[in-house]
Amino acid sequence: MRIFRRLALLATLLTLAAGVLWYVRDAGIPEVTVVTPIRGKAVHAVYATGVVEPVHWARVTPLVRGRIAEICACEGKRVMRGAFLVRLESGEEEAAYTEVEAEARYLEEELKRQRDLFARKVASAATYERALSTYTKALAALAAARERLEDLQLRAPLDGVVLRQDGEVGEVVEPGQVLFWVGQPEPLWIEAAVDEEDIPLVAAGQRVVIKADAFSDQVLEGTVERITPKGDPLNKSYRVRIALPADSPLLIGMTTEANILVRTVDDALLVPTASLRGNALWVVEGGLARRMDVEVGVRGDDRSQVTAGVDGTTQVIVDPGPDLAAGQRVSTVRGGRR
């Protein structure tokens, strides 16, 4: 019995010794997540957001304030250039036009009479010139009154489809308020905004990968068509137009996310971009952390290409903290596929 007690005491002491040894060895050792590089496609892309628009379209807005008296029911219908869209109330303008027109007719008759008197040398040349000048001014006033009447009628600025129509009879509208969007339903492109720091990387002809909420299960494509030379200094961005193929399911007005592919490498050795610290990685060798200089190729948002310095067996620390020191002992946890 005494022997068994001694054996139990010895086992307890061994357990305590192992615990102390573990504490001395592992206490304070940081835990890091590691992955090994993988092979795949390296993509350097410029991100942008944009809206789908027709290539050929125009907004129709009134030039003056007024109340809608008549409006076409033509949303979604094809119209020809010059087709009637909307008329604002014009009672005062029509009365003014009638008055100016009557005065112009009177002055025209007066001019004919003065011309006849001048030809028969009954009236002086000065009298005739005054009549001519007065009539000319009346014609100018008539033209201005006619233009004011025309301003109260809005017409289609081009052949196309009424893409959208706003406003109802009786509604008061303001100058610049958009009442109609008229344009060609195809071709379409995306008007995207690219940050000024990225615009030097963008060029016409580049392939674009597009995502839209309405087609979340599809990856759509386009091509950089045009870059506006002057940027927006307020938003610090440049306008880039991305052409869409004829069979694109995207609809006018949809918002999109676009990744403009600047460079791709098909068979690249990839590491998490978050693991890079400039042109260096932190790796684990023999249980110790070590900083390793590498050559970086294509940098992506999630993964980046490493062209020299590591291989497929290197244990790369995914997100090395600022307190990690070279030669420091670490414990590792295997990360998921990165």
Image: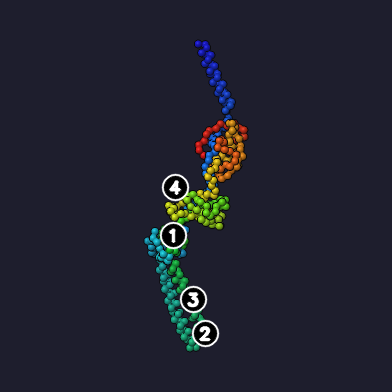
Q: Is residue 303 above or below residue 68?
A: above
Where residue 107 appears, as percent x and y from the top left, is 45, 79
Foreground mark, 1 or 3, reads: 1
Give the CA separation, mark 3 to mark 4.
66 Å
Foreground mark, 2 or 4, reads: 4
Residue corresponding to mark 1: 184
- Ranked by sequence position, the earlier of labels 2 and 4 is 2
Foreground mark, 3 or 4, reads: 4
Where residue 259 appears, as percent x and y from the top left, is 51, 49
- Ranked by sequence position, the earlier of labels 1 and 4 is 1
Give the CA separation, mark 2 to mark 3.
18 Å
Residue corresponding to mark 3: 137
- Which kind of residue does numbered mark 2 sit on? Ala
| Residue 218's disc number | 4
Where residue 287 appears, as percent x and y from the top left, is 58, 31
- State the SS at label 4: loop
- Ranked by sequence position, the earlier of labels 1 and 2 is 2
- State the SS at label 3: helix
Tell me if label 2 and label 4 are in contact, CB under 8 Å.
no
- State the SS at label 2: helix
**Does residue 252 appear left or right of residue 262 in this picture?**
left
- Ranked by sequence position, the earlier of labels 3 and 4 is 3
Disc 1 residue crowd, few under 14, some 14–19, many 20+, Cα 10 Å: some
| Residue 125's disc number | 2
Give the CA separation, mark 2 to mark 4.
82 Å
Q: Residue at x 48, y 87 (%)?
A: 119
- State the SS at label 1: loop
Of all residues, the one furthest to the front in this rendering is 267
Of all residues, the one furthest to the left in this rendering is 73
